[in-house]
Image: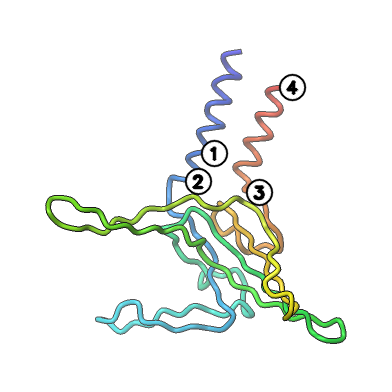
Amino acid sequence: MLTKIIISIVALYSVIISDQAYAIRCFKCLVTEEVSFANEEENLPNITPACSKFDSSSKFIVECPYSTMCMKTISTMYLQYGLEQNTITRGCAPQKSSTLVFRNGNWHKEDSVKDVYVEECRLINENVLAASVKTLCYCGSDLCNSAKRLIIPLCQLTTLSILLLINN
């Protein structure tokens, strides 16, 4: 009995730690390649590759310090004769919230990360007249936004399996 309790506690702890021990890494790409200059002093370009060239390589990987989830957006435009056009974007789920706090006689900007998403894919009818829909997928493990569908993180799936075996 004590062994089952210890295993359950360790399993639960591993699920909690797996999502909070480090900044999540996500794949990032846009409809078209984008060049920006993140560091103006050194004039170094920051290149976000196009999703049409997505291959899961390291050039698509980014750290997400202000996010606990990755996202993937699939926009579908329905054309004539039954044709459709899909565009995909990937990146960190926007969760950063900035507020001004008055402390010691001065205003300070404080950033926080809000948990506002559920791990799921949901369909949004974007524009009925234009016959377009958008699928938004959110997931909470490293590099989870590469798949064609949402995948349960391996650590959480293993933990749930162990808990089911223990309780049966």
Colour basis: rainbow
- Up/down of 84 relative to 19, above or below: below
Specify which label sits upstream in the sequence, 3 or 1.
1
Specify which label sits upstream in the sequence, 2 or 3.
2
Label 4 CA crowd tier, 10 Å (few <14, some 14–19, many 20+): few
- Up/down of 2 relative to 126, above or below: above
Residues marked 2 and 1 touching at CB (< 8 Å): yes
Residues marked 1 and 4 touching at CB (< 8 Å): no
The amino acid on which the numbered mark 1 sits, given as a three-letter code, is Val
Residue at the far left in the pictured view: 105
Q: Which mark is residue 19?
A: 2
Location of mark 4 (residue): 168
Residues marked 2 and 4 touching at CB (< 8 Å): no
The amino acid on which the numbered mark 4 sits, given as a three-letter code, is Asn
Q: Residue 137: x, y in percent?
A: 63, 60
Label 3 CA crowd tier, 10 Å (few <14, some 14–19, many 20+): some
Location of mark 3 (residue): 152
